[in-house]
Amino acid sequence: MIDILFSAFLLSAVLLGIHSFFGLEIIKRGIIFTDLAIGQMAAVGGAVSILFLDGEYLDPTSLSFALAAGAIVAFAVQRTDKPEAFIGLLYAFGLSAVFIILSKSSHGMETFQKLMASDILFTPLSEIFKTAGIYAVLGIILLLFYNRVNGLAKEVLFFVTFAITVTVAVRLAGVLVVFALLVAPALIALRIKKGIPIINAWIIGTVVNIAAILVSYNFDFPTGYTLVLLHATLALTVSLIMPVCTVRGLQES
Amino acid sequence: MRRCLSTILICAAFLPAVASADPLKVVAAYPYIGDLVERIGGSNVRVLSLARGDYNPHVIIPRPSFIAHVRRADLLIISGAQLEIGWMPPLLRQANNPAVQTGEPGFLDLSQYVTLSDVPTSVSRELGDVHPEGNPHFYLDPENILLLARAIKDKLVQLDSRNASYYEDRYREFSELWGKKLVEWTQKMTPLRNTRVVEYHKVFDYFVHRYKLQIAATVEPLPGIPPTSKHIEQLEAVLTTAPARFLLQDVYNPEDASRHLAEKLNMKLVVLPHDVGSVKEATSIFSLFDELVRRISE
């Protein structure tokens, strides 16, 4: 069983690496649900591909919908003073669009769910390495350019890389796991006074990931949900007991 | 020396097969399969069922133990006809057990032993979650259970031939008992012949057709797609002119649309079990069908 647990851990580690960066950024920007909206719009792309193209071009279609969603959010953040409301509505739009599209589809919900999200337990190693490769490229691009550009260019860079990241991750681990890895370690990291936030997020996230996978194995719980539950429990507890005034990221920005 | 070594190696390779006093490790996709295997395999098999009987058989949330069980299995039995399409292929891949891969002796697909209904004639799947191989809920025809039991018996004999007579005896015992029950169920169901029924999902087709009841409509407009207002409206129109007596509901789909229709059109809403463990009375393959018959005929 070690190999299966190891690949689940490897996947969670690969996801955690880049999601911690985005997590810190979206919390600072106050646009936490962006990943759900983008993930949901990627699902609309998937549904469109299933309805009109019989599931052909699923990846490019869902990616282009995700990129479009990223662009819309980037634009909205500049335009509106209530980005969260905008993002929430975009999510609701995407969710209902999927149901409406699929009600006319030749495949229905079953096929859709099978195509759109797999379980963290079922991800083959080859997929994990492929994802690690994509994330490495995105990471290098962000490292090289993110602090050198400003204004609209920075926003576009951020949302394009974020949309790609989320689309790839949701396909492998499902929307809930991605959301937990994105927000929970970052939220805790922002409350710690010492060290660099992203390193703290990595350390916290890794410890929780390992704990979740061991708990899931020992008690035979569904692995993805266990991961979400532990991340959420820790982040909620820390948020309740640590005073708000120490939130450093918010003071900086 | 080299020859001696290779002889030892060859012997060692056959050792597990020869010395297997251990029971055969069987993993069943659904509880009804597990129960059949237990009845025929008795103390020579150790059975584990993956899915829970009260859940939607199309959707299973995997747990780590699934992989462990399939990995250690000598025999994996699926219901087939794509009922497990959403969860079995990745599970088989992750478990990485060469003995139970599709086509290997340690793999048994029960749908191969029965005749499926609703096989689509065209490949374009215009009709919702239609399974290209046909309606996969064939195990709710009690006559089919005998064919499935025989397929399981043959497979156990093939994998564990030393205990062939044991399996043959238990199979004969089972089929005699089942034959008696078939007579009893037919007696109870005969008065309902030609009764018109509505189903939520096409899960009870085989059961209903076996006893010559008529399916007037389904609450789902297409398999796997929740009812739309227009479809409900059409159903109301159709069922007003040609009424149906029962509305057959499974335990895992939402009941609200069915309850609305049943009340409005004066049908009796009957919640039927679809697998062993789906309702508390259905504890075995026998009580599953006892309960199906009881709930619809009482």
Image (cartoon, grey):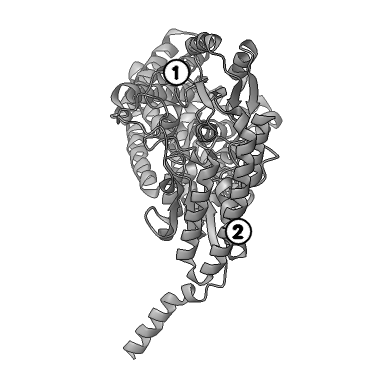
Is label 2 on the same chain as label 1?
no
Q: For label 1, count other residues whose C-alpha is less than 10 Å away and answer few (under 14), some (14-19) or many (20+).
A: many
Q: Tell me the number on the disc at residue B173.
A: 2
Question: Closest to the observer: B38 or A6?
Answer: B38
Q: Is mark 2 on a helix, strand or loop?
A: helix
Q: Which of A149 and B74 is in front in this view?
A: B74
Residue A233 in sight from this viewpoint:
no
Q: In the rendered image, which residue does mark 1 sit on? A: A94
Does residue B128 lie above or below B111 as drawn? above
* Category of crowding for the residue at label 2, using alpha-carbon neighbours closer than 10 angstroms: few (below 14), some (14–19), many (at least 20): some
**Residue type indicated by callout 2:** Glu
Tell me the amino acid under the disc marked 1: Gly
- Rendered position, B142 above or below A110: below
- Residue B110 at x, y = what percent? 46, 48
Task: Determine whether, in the image, residue B85 is placed left or right of residue A236.
Answer: left
Q: In this view, does B95 lie to the left or right of A238?
A: left
Q: Estimate the x, y position of residue A1 in percent, counting from the top left.
A: 51, 57
What residue sits 43% from the left and 36% below the top? A18
Q: Determine the CA span between mark 2 and mark 1.
A: 57 Å
The C terminus of chain B, quarter of image: top right
